Amino acid sequence: MDQFTINLMFVGASFALYIGIAIWARAGSTSEFYAAGRGVHPVTNGMATAADWMSAASFISMAGLIAFTGYDNSTFLMGWTGGYVLLALLLAPYLRKFGKFTVSEFIGDRFYSPTARVVAVICLIVASTTYVIGQMTGVGVAFGRFLEVSNTAGLLIGACVVFAYAVFGGMKGVTYTQVAQYVVLIMAYTIPAIFISLQLTGNPIPALGLFGDHAASGEPLLAKLDAIVTELGFNEYTAHHADTFNMVLFTLSLMIGTAGLPHVIMRFFTVPKVADARWSAGWALVFIALLYLTAPAVGAMARLNITEMMWPNGGIEGGAVTVQQIENDPQYDWMATWQQTGLLGWEDKNGDGAIQYYNDQNADLQATAEANGWAGNELTNFNRDILVLANPEIANLPGWVIGLVAAGGLAAALSTAAGLLLAISSAVSHDLIKGSINPSISEKGELLSARIAMAVAIGVATYLGLNPPGFAAQTVALAFGLAAASIFPALMMGIFTKVNNKGAVAGMLAGLIVTLVYIFLHKGWLFIPDTNSFTDADPLLGTVKSTSFGAIGAMVNFAVAFLVSKSTEAIPAEIEELVESVRIPRGAGAAQDH
């Protein structure tokens, strides 16, 4: 049985399962569409939250960015994991106690202002749409490879699949679909990692194998990797090379952006009790840790495998892989397959019949390159988003493992895409249409408007996904920055301070606008290519990249909100009582002196 057929079997079986669950759990009311009837068990909700959280950025893109950069991109792991702890401790229980369907509804009621609710909807739509672009990018990569079509065709196919099960199931259908998707994606991520760890280190636990010895050479795996990449002119894998200030800002932006993501926060509205929200967060962290502890090993081992394949005779002295070997050796079949997607490319620039992979920007390597007659790096394109999906093929693992990874990559991208689209549709139908434009709309009309909003959002995200502003994880990082600058401060001030409605509105607008403008200056206006004035290699403010600016945007939000609130009237007494009731457990008495 050929690999294409195996891929179709795994992907087809998983999709049949997802769509079957969506039909079985189809939402029949607004309560089921927005919050799954508030009847989801904490363990089930924790697993669904983990699937919702571990998007294409986590499954497909993160390990690739770590693999080609090393230690400096560990910020993705630190920021996303730390942010989830913030969300679990500071926001989730209080928001569940408030008892609303959506984040925008909480902001509108807490700040006693329809304007605040509308501004929150705008912030949510901007952040979520940017996030969906990253997911659709991952969907295009996965579908393109495993259906052996172009990246564009894969993206269009994926959009149709998302539409099929997300539009009809609502939160109820999406919740149980995401449980199935978590099982698929975690198996798809860890099983190949176990195989590769055994191959390279003899240790079946990838996280331990990463710090073990390389089986072939006997030296520590990371020392072996450092030696290989530095010989080829790349930065030492385990060392810190990036700007520390930008690194701190980026980690902070991911952390507070995580805690402000509406599609994740919505998951805590689906459980029966406030205590269940805390348990859901705890279980979600357990399920997330299974992948996040494995990702650094996946990145490092893949980088080692790729480098050794490009230099199969022991490094520069032994010579690079030949074009003939790439075309005729079954071990290199993966390169021809991925080349068809447009995401991998090579060129024999100097006509010597070999493909030299090295850092041609490293001045220290120029003498070696000239002495050997090299004409530049000949691995001309290696999209970071393909690494995890190509990993089993690079390691020459069995066909069924490759098929499983295909299903897992699609599960990761589609699960988060569905959650984000649900957040967008809820904001438009429940908060904008029912909350502001037409409060008397029927439940049937509200459901219809939610599904139409979701369909429109899929169309916009698909269009923008054809020309994304970066790799999947980088695009997602932009969305986190927008959530960090707009939504997170409003939630924190709504729960823990007495900021008034004018302050909240001014803060959200200030944080959103300043962050959005900074991103557009670096990534192009409305993400249109070649309309940018700066790049992340040469940013506007010192070393602060567009992906790191969310933390500064959040500071602007807080500062503007407090200044405006201090210079205007105090919040009403009933709102002050509401804030106290949300923050203080019911039945708590005064402290007693012993």
Image (cartoon, rainbow, N blue to C red):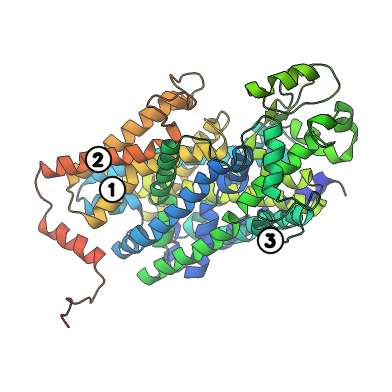
Asked if one can make out residue 533 in the rendered structure from this viewpoint, the answer is yes
Residue 410: percent from left, percent from top? 64, 48
Q: To which residue does mark 1 refer?
A: 490
Pointer 2 local density, CA inside 10 Å: few below 14, some 14–19, many at least 20:
many
Which amino acid type corresponds to the residue marked 3 in the rendered image? Ile
Tell me if residue 393 comes above or below residue 341 in the rendering: below
Which residue appears at 21% of the width and 42% of the height? 561
Secondary structure state at the residue bearing disc 3: loop
Tell me if residue 258 comes above or below residue 474 in the rendering: below
CA–CA distance between discs 1 and 3? Answer: 42 Å
Residue 279: percent from left, percent from top? 44, 69
User: Which numbered disc, 1 or 3, marks the residue that appears first in the sequence?
Assistant: 3
State which quadrant residue 582 falls in: bottom left
Q: To which residue does mark 2 refer?
A: 507
User: Which numbered disc, 1 or 2, marks the residue that appears first in the sequence?
Assistant: 1
CA–CA distance between discs 1 and 2? Answer: 8 Å
- Residues 528 and 492: in front is 492
Q: Is residue 129 left or right of residue 497?
A: right
Pointer 3 local density, CA inside 10 Å: few below 14, some 14–19, many at least 20:
some
Which amino acid type corresponds to the residue marked 1 in the rendered image? Ala
- Residues 247 and 514: in front is 247
Secondary structure state at the residue bearing disc 2: helix
Which residue appears at 37% of the width and 60% of the height? 92
Q: Are marks 1 and 2 in contact (CB under 8 Å)?
A: yes
Instruction: In the rendered structure, find residue 205 and report the number of the disc placed on it.
Output: 3
Quadrant the C terminus occupies: bottom left
